[in-house]
Image (cartoon, rainbow, N blue to C red):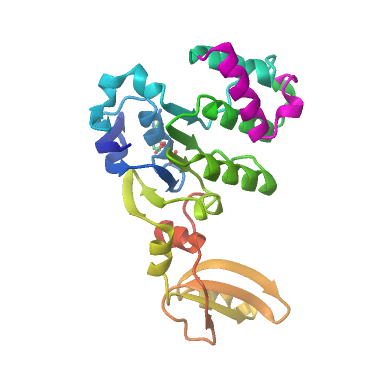
Amino acid sequence: MELEMRNLTKHYGKKEALKGVSVTLTPGIYGLLGPNGAGKSTWMNILTGNLRQTSGEIFLDGENISHLGRSYRRRLGYCPQQQTFYPSFTARRFLYYLASLQDMSREQAGERIEWALSAVALSDVANKPIGSFSGGMKQRLLIAQSLLHDPDILIMDEPTAGLDPRQRIAIRNLIGEIALHKIVMISTHVVQDVEYIAKELILLSQGEILRQATPPELLRELEGQLWEAVVPEAQLNEVSAYGTVCGLFQKSEGICVRLLGEKPPIPCKPAEPNLEDVYLRYFGAGEGL
Ligand code: ADP
């Protein structure tokens, strides 16, 4: 399976939200990283057919998706960012409703719905109205609906938003398990969500792909550029001038600074790069706030 995008652009009036994105996806998980406004949701909405691109084409196994129409959408699962539900529906009824829209038989729907509810740990509350759910429960229900028909292509826009760390790990593991033979694209601000499961990371900024590479490749690029120094608080500004500060924490001897850049002219020791450092290298410490 191959999903190819050729030179996708999207203009909202004068705003160029996507500036010619070309990429070919094959089965595996792709982590889409970028600050707010980078164009991630726009891209995902185009992939799912909710938005029409201004120019460019998308091909699934060589066939233009605009010709495939419904047969493309049937193979697609989408977990959107917006939570729009009928608050009086129960979780189970909501999933039955969506299954019926997807032409699933009642028997098939029943089986998949129980699986999906259990996969996102909502079986116990399946008969409660969605209006009584917390943000995290609604988010897990959105994830469940995207998996209902076992899609070949799964597009997930910040699926872990609003989840606590334990739930995030559970969802990350679930996505890792079900991704076999699927093309999965996940946008996230939480680099750890995709750190261990992504085949490749796509770094998007201002509508353009800055870099597409495997996590180990990205980490290798930072080798020899990460440092840790313990300094008194008064020296913090001085130290920050020698690179990007990737982390700070208080120690009894002073403040431990994690610094990305040329070796600072103070006693420091090399540190192991992680993907958060990669994010900061490409997007800077201040962006995305
Ligand atoms: P992200 O998902 O990475 O935060 P978006 O795709 O939401 O980025 O937005 C990309 C850019 O397009 C932003 O500058 C945003 O303000 C703009 N944008 C998104 N949707 C619209 C819209 N409906 N009308 C006008 N501008 C939009």
- 221 left or right of 134 in image: left
In front here: 252 or 239? 252
Measured from the top left, where is residue 3 in percent x and y?
Answer: 31, 36
Measured from the top left, where is residue 50 in percent x and y?
Answer: 40, 23
**Residue 137 is drawn in which quadrant?**
top right
Measured from the top left, where is residue 109 in percent x and y?
Answer: 58, 18
Q: Residue at x 74, y 19 (%)?
A: 127
- 59 left or right of 267 in image: left
**Residue 256 is drawn in which quadrant?**
bottom right
Magenta region includes residue 19: no
Measured from the top left, where is residue 85 in percent x and y?
Answer: 61, 20
Q: Residue at x 51, y 64 (%)?
A: 274
Q: How many marks?
A: 0
**Quadrant of picture, ligand 1:** top left
Q: Residue at x 29, y 25 (%)?
A: 65
Above or below residue 101? Residue 133 is below
Is there any visible trace of residue 135 in the rendered image?
Answer: no
Residue stretch rendered in magenta on the structure: 104-129
Above or below residue 44? Residue 275 is below
Magenta region includes residue 108: yes
Q: Main secondary structure of the magenta part?
A: helix
Q: Residue at x 63, y 33 (%)?
A: 140
- 224 left or right of 12 in image: right
- 279 left or right of 130 in image: left
- Quadrant location, the N terminus: top left
Is there any visible trace of residue 264 in the rendered image?
Answer: yes
